[in-house]
Amino acid sequence: MMTQPLQMFENLTSETTPAGGNALAKIGFSSHDRRLVEMNARYARAAVLADGLSAAIVWLGGQYKRLVGALKADLRIRSAEAQLFRMSDRDLADLGLCRADIPFAVREAAAEEATAGETPLIATAGTPVTAANQNLRRHVAA
């Protein structure tokens, strides 16, 4: 069995030097300088990993927020459908709907609300209402 000769510090490699030689020792770096370079390299690697981890956590938070929003929207749609399905046929006819139109009408209203970005305002009984058959052209000077 052959024995390996002892290797000197100059022949060893580190994280900052390629295998096969110690370029830092050849240009006058001491072991203390070499440790500082390795420590800075480790710090930079840890900073990159921390940045990546924080970006991943922010991304997961956004995905969670989208999922919760989608579930809430689905529950609102289902509750609106259930409320309309509990109505009588006469009440649905007053709204201009039949039972087969309920899912389509609710989802269409939800899509319009999502594109508008806000809930539509419904006029209350105390607000003045303009008549639909009012002729506004008679005020225009000819």
Image (cartoon, grey):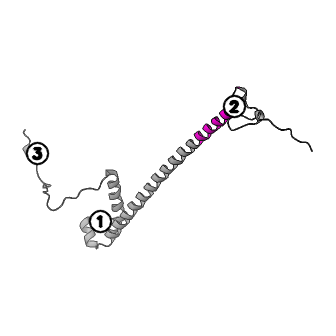
- For badge 3, the amino acid type reads Arg
- Where 138 sits versus 108, above or below? above
- Left or right of 31 on screen, residue 80: left
Q: Main secondary structure of the magenta part?
A: helix
- For badge 1, the amino acid type reads Leu
Residue 117 percent location from the top left of the image: 32, 51
Q: Residues within 10 Å of mark 2 (few under 14, many from 20)?
A: few
Q: Which residue is mark 1?
A: 97
Question: In the rendered view of the protein, which quadrant contains the N terminus?
Answer: top right
Q: Which numbered disc covers residue 37?
A: none
Q: Which residue is mark 2?
A: 30
As measured in the structure, the alpha-carbon distance from the residue carrying label 2 to the one carrying label 1 is 86 Å
Q: Which numbered disc covers residue 137?
A: 3
Q: Residues within 10 Å of mark 3 (few under 14, many from 20)?
A: few
- For badge 2, the amino acid type reads Ser
- Where 83 sits versus 1, above or below? below
Which residue is painted at 65% across and 37% down in the image?
38
Does the magenta portion include 13?
no
Secondary element under disc 2, as helix, strand or loop, is loop
Secondary element under disc 3, as helix, strand or loop, is helix
- Left or right of 75 on screen, residue 141: left
Farthest-out residue, top: 27
Q: Are marks 1 and 3 in contact (CB under 8 Å)?
A: no
Q: Are marks 2 and 3 in contact (CB under 8 Å)?
A: no
Badge 2 or badge 3: first in the primary sequence: 2
- Where 124 sits versus 82, above or below? above
